[in-house]
């Protein structure tokens, strides 16, 4: 009887350990993705935006100019 309880306890501890390991791996992946996203959007840190950040900024500027060209009375 005690052997069965011991085995059950051991299996439960393994599952808890695996869950914690999965959460740790998820957190590390999330952190790496966040760092890459910041690097892509903001560039090298010299004040200039990255290529993707500049492309997005240009798209917003173009859309803003087109909206302003239409005017509020259209």
Image (cartoon, rainbow, N blue to C red):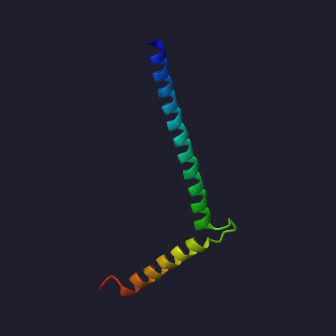
Q: Quadrant of residue 42?
A: bottom right
Q: Who's the residue at 57% across and 62% down the image?
A: 37
Which quarter of the rendering shows the C terminus?
A: bottom left
Q: Who's the residue at 52% across and 79% down the image?
A: 58
Q: Who's the residue at 56% across and 71% down the image?
A: 53
Q: Quadrant of residue 64?
A: bottom left
Q: Find residue 4 and report its horizontal and vertical position in percent.
A: 45, 18
Q: Quadrant of residue 67?
A: bottom left
Q: Is residue 74 shown above or below 10?
A: below
Q: Who's the residue at 52% across and 30% down the image?
A: 14
Residue sitting nearer the eye, 63 or 74: 63
Which quarter of the rendering shows the N terminus?
A: top left
Q: Is residue 72 shown above or below 10?
A: below
Q: Find residue 72 and report its horizontal and vertical position in percent.
A: 33, 82
User: Quick check: 33 left or right of 70?
Assistant: right
Residue sitting nearer the eye, 36 or 2: 2
User: Quick check: 67 left or right of 60?
Assistant: left
Q: Is residue 24 shown above or below 55?
A: above
Q: Residue furthest top?
A: 1
Residue sitting nearer the eye, 7 or 27: 7
């Amino acid at each position: 009887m005690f052997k069965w309880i011991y085995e059950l306890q051991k299996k439960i501890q393994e599952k808890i350990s695996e869950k914690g390991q999965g959460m740790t791996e998820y957190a590390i992946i999330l952190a790496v993705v966040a760092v890459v996203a910041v690097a892509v959007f903001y560039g090298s840190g010299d004040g200039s935006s990255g290529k993707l950040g500049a492309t997005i900024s240009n798209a917003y500027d173009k859309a803003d100019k087109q909206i302003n060209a239409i005017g509020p009375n259209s």
